[in-house]
Image (cartoon, rainbow, N blue to C red):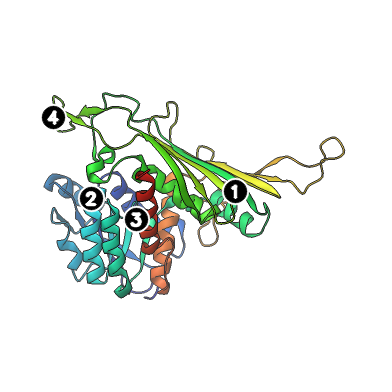
């Protein structure tokens, strides 16, 4: 696949709720952030569960086709890239159809709603020749990119232990209606929704590892139905989980995800300790990575040893420098960088990471944690 001077590649987005809009934003704004972009794209088709939402997406965001038949758009000749942004229980049919059609796939996390579905995808991947990538945007902040560089450079040495968490507070209110993200029958719950991000990020930084133990909690035993507030539904999707993991060389990690963390906004954070130093990051302060170099002298009077703030801010590699290195990065900007990574791989005809096989491996981990 060649670059941005060729015809625009047609994009279909399946599902156009919150994350579908995020993916569309990435395509529309890619040329602002990356000059030149890896390739040109155009929004061809949008498919949603209701005709009115599909029509609204077409009208507001410039899609050429709107439909409620999500699988029909995959086989269109003018669709080259399929974005899977539907609820989790609709991922597997779309993935399998897009793999059969040989389309490039950009899939939101988690890969599927169940491990059994993930194994179906795994079985289809050996014959897949297009490019597939998972949407794990936490890898794509300058601070997390720099954290990986420091680890690969040996700056913190052998890892002794680590911890990470992704904390929200939206489910603290027991009167909040049940939506699909909290409905385990649709692949919901914080293990799939938030812990998937934590696992991916820490596998990238400190992995590989295996789960040792996990505990979880359902905060409200039943919640009101979203469509019929007078009706309540038993809740089986967990609101909190914490798991202990172990690397092959014996380092332990504690990973947590919660939607009942009162006071939290969108708090993804990690801390990794090594024999030569440590690093830590909090998404609520996305411009800076903290680094501790234990090899620096602590004499006299403390010497130069201590936690150092690295101003990573908006220092993306070229050509991703707009609007400038000193500008604070944002949540949407990391999603654009994640999509750029995918489009760059498509343009070059090389595998993208994190790929769909990684999504399968992560689904297996999620399943093991859920079974403790």
User: Dividing the picture into quarters, in which one does residue 28 lie?
Assistant: bottom left
Is 213 or 233 nearer to us in this picture?
A: 213
Q: Which of marks 2 and 4 is nearer the N terminus?
A: 2
Q: How far apart are marks 4 and 3 (CA)?
A: 36 Å
**Residue at image mark 3:** 28
Query: What quarter of the picture does the C terminus occupy?
Result: top left
Q: Nearer the viewer, mark 2 or mark 1?
A: 2
Q: In this view, does 81 lie above or below 247?
A: below
The residue tagged with tag 1: helix, strand or loop? loop
Q: Which of marks 4 and 1 is in front?
A: 4
> Residue 44: image x %, image y %?
23, 61
Q: Do the residues labelled 2 and 1 touch (CB within 8 Å)?
A: no
Q: How crowded is mark 3: few (under 14 residues within 10 Å), some or many (20 or more)?
A: some
> Residue 142: image x %, image y %?
54, 51
Q: Would residue 229 be seen by someone viewing this image from the given angle? A: yes
Q: Of the numbered discs in the image, which one, if any, rests on residue 228? A: 4
Q: Is residue 166 shown left or right of residue 60?
A: right
Q: Which of marks 4 and 3 is nearer the N terminus?
A: 3
Q: Are marks 3 and 1 in contact (CB under 8 Å)?
A: no
Is 241 or 167 nearer to us in this picture?
A: 241
Q: Which of marks 2 and 3 is nearer the N terminus?
A: 3
Query: What quarter of the picture does the N terminus occupy?
Result: bottom left
Q: How far apart are marks 2 and 3 (CA)?
A: 28 Å
Name the residue: 50% across, 37% down: 284
Q: Nearer the viewer, mark 4 or mark 3?
A: 4
**Residue at image mark 2:** 89
Q: Which of marks 2 and 3 is in front?
A: 2
Q: Which of marks 2 and 4 is in front?
A: 2
Q: Nearer the viewer, mark 3 or mark 1?
A: 1
């Amino acid at each position: 696949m060649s670059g941005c001077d060729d015809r625009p590649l047609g994009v279909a987005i399946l599902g156009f709720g919150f994350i579908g809009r995020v993916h569309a934003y990435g395509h529309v704004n890619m040329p602002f952030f990356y000059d030149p972009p890896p390739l040109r794209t155009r929004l061809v088709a949008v498919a949603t569960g209701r005709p009115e939402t599909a029509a609204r997406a077409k009208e507001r965001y410039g899609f050429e086709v709107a439909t409620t038949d999500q699988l029909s758009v995959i086989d269109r000749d003018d669709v080259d890239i399929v974005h899977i942004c539907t609820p989790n229980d609709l991922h597997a049919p779309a993935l399998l159809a897009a793999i059969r059609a040989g389309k490039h796939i950009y899939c939101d996390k988690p890969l599927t709603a169940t491990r059994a579905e993930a194994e179906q995808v795994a079985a289809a991947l050996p014959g897949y020749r297009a490019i597939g990538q998972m949407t794990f945007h936490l890898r794509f902040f300058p601070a997390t990119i720099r954290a990986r560089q420091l680890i690969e450079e040996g700056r913190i040495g052998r890892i002794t232990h680590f911890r990470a968490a992704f904390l929200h507070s939206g489910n603290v209110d027991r009167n909040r209606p049940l939506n699909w993200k909290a409905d385990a029958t649709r692949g919901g719950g914080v293990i799939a929704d938030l812990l998937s991000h934590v696992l991916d990020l820490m596998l990238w930084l400190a992995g590989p590892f295996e789960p040792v133990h996990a505990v979880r909690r359902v905060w409200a035993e039943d919640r009101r139905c979203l469509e019929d507030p007078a009706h309540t539904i038993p809740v089986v999707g967990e609101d909190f989980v914490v798991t202990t993991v172990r690397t092959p060389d014996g380092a332990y990690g504690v990973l947590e995800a919660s939607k009942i963390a009162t006071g939290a906004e969108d708090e993804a954070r990690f801390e990794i300790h090594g024999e030569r130093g440590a690093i830590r990051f909090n998404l609520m302060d996305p411009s800076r990575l903290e680094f501790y170099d234990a090899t620096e002298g602590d004499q006299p009077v403390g010497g130069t040893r201590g936690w150092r703030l690295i101003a990573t801010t908006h220092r993306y590699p070229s050509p991703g420098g707009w609007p400038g290195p000193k500008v604070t990065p944002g949540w949407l900007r990391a999603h654009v960088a994640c999509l750029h990574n995918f489009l760059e791989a498509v343009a070059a005809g090389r595998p993208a990471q994190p790929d769909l096989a990684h999504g399968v491996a992560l689904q297996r981990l999620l399943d093991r944690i859920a079974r403790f």
